[in-house]
Amino acid sequence: MFLRNCWYLAGWADEVRPEAMIGRQIAGQHVLLARARDGMIHAMADTCPHRLVPLSMGQCADDSIRCAYHGLRFALNGVCVENPHGPVSRALSVGTFACEERHAAIWLWLGDETADPALIPDYGFIDRTPVEARVKGYLHSNADYRLMVDNIMDLTHADYLHATLLGGGINTRARASVQQDGDAITISWTANDDKLAPLHAQALGVADGKGDFYNNILWQAPGNMVQRIMLARPGEMATAPMDSMTCHVMTPETATTTHYFFCHTSDAVSADPAIAPVVLQGLNQAFAFEDKPMLEAQSRRIGGRDFWEQGPAMLPSDKGAVMVRRALDRMIEQERTVKP
């Protein structure tokens, strides 16, 4: 179900203030994220070894976590530094995880292999964008993360599920191309001198609604995706495109629930950061009120059964999503069968 030797986006960096903590379940593992006084982020198991209660219910102070149940105190490296009821023993230690702060996010490594920061997906476009021009958000979904990845890898659904703003048929009419480079899979859609989706025509300012369209998704395991959309007046893609970048990160919480992190940047918002709240409202409309109900209904209908065993009828537009599922299945199986 879950890949272990990989980086999971566990939270946005600004979710964890200095001398504060949050508890979050990532790929079935309960994790506590805490920030020390020096600003460094730490990750440890969110379970007290004494009575197995969440440590995140306690207090974070003086670079330590005090359990709210019986008062045991743990340093951020997992070592118990105080036991009000007796001596400190090795049994009173908490497991820790490698974590890194990069691209305004907290990245978590759950696997047994040595964590390599070089394997963190490159979301440098976030760093290059002023904070006030980053349209960033988080949604919790009661859906399988793999279904949510499918949703981004096949954007022809936008013509129907997001018809008001992103529909009109261009996503279905556009020419699709899928490529695999190692464990990364890219799908792109291109259309020239075609009728753009209403939102894109408005953004480009074309009276007849026509323009050139490029939409590209890069997937990296397990649920990290970067989307680039470029729009231009007919024939001007090479010289005067309107550019945007968005990361869609589906981090599994459990087998049936998912953390969805997104961050959108664009030429338009960078030029006028005051429109960021309006753009966020539009993204939330699509993600929270259109995608989310559909994906949750899909998950309920599948009911935890194996996706492939249900015999889904595949369409040509499913190629990217199918390639991703096959790649992820292979990576999980390889990890599962590796002998210690």
Image (cartoon, rainbow, N blue to C red):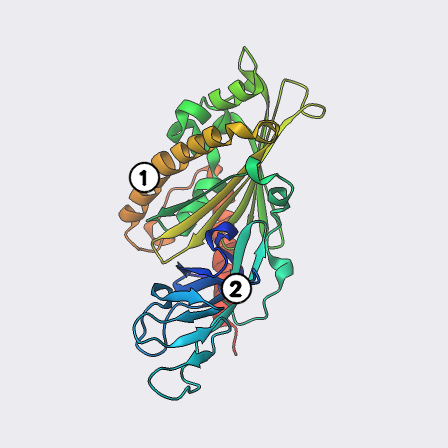
**Residue pictured at 50% horizontal, 68% vertical:** 97
Amino acid type for the residue under numbered disc 2: Ala
The answer to whether residue 303 is left or right of residue 320 is left
Q: Nearer the viewer, residue 84 or 67?
A: 84
Residue 182, quarter of picture: bottom right
What is the residue that sits farthest to the right in this orientation? Answer: 239
Neighbours of disc 2 within 10 Å: few (<14), some (14-19), many (20+): many
Q: Is residue 216 visible?
A: no
Please state the horizontal and vertical placement of residue 12, each as a whole percent of the image. Answer: 49, 50
How far apart marks 2 and 1 lie (CA) works out to: 38 Å
Q: Is residue 240 visible?
A: yes
Which label belongs to residue 101?
none
Q: Nearer the viewer, residue 186 or 166?
A: 166
The answer to whether residue 195 is left or right of residue 21 is right
Residue 208, quarter of picture: top right
Q: Going from the N terminus, do you reach mark 2 or mark 1 first?
A: 2
Q: Nearer the viewer, residue 255 or 52?
A: 52
Neighbours of disc 1 within 10 Å: few (<14), some (14-19), many (20+): some
Residue 193's place in the image compared with 320, above or below, is: above
The answer to whether residue 42 is left or right of residue 86 is right
What is the residue that sits farthest to the top in this orientation? Answer: 207
The answer to whether residue 114 is left or right of residue 257 is right
List the residue tagged with mark 2. 36
- Where the N terminus falls, by quadrant? bottom left
List the residue tagged with mark 1. 293
Please state the horizontal and vertical placement of residue 89, each as a whole percent of the image. Answer: 42, 87
Please state the horizontal and vertical placement of residue 176, each as a whole percent of the image. Answer: 56, 34
Residue 48's place in the image compared with 259, above or below, is: below
Amino acid type for the residue under numbered disc 1: Pro
Please state the horizontal and vertical placement of residue 35, each as a whole percent of the image. Answer: 50, 61
Question: In terms of secondary structure, where does tag 1 sit?
Answer: helix
Eye-nearest disc, 2 or 1: 2
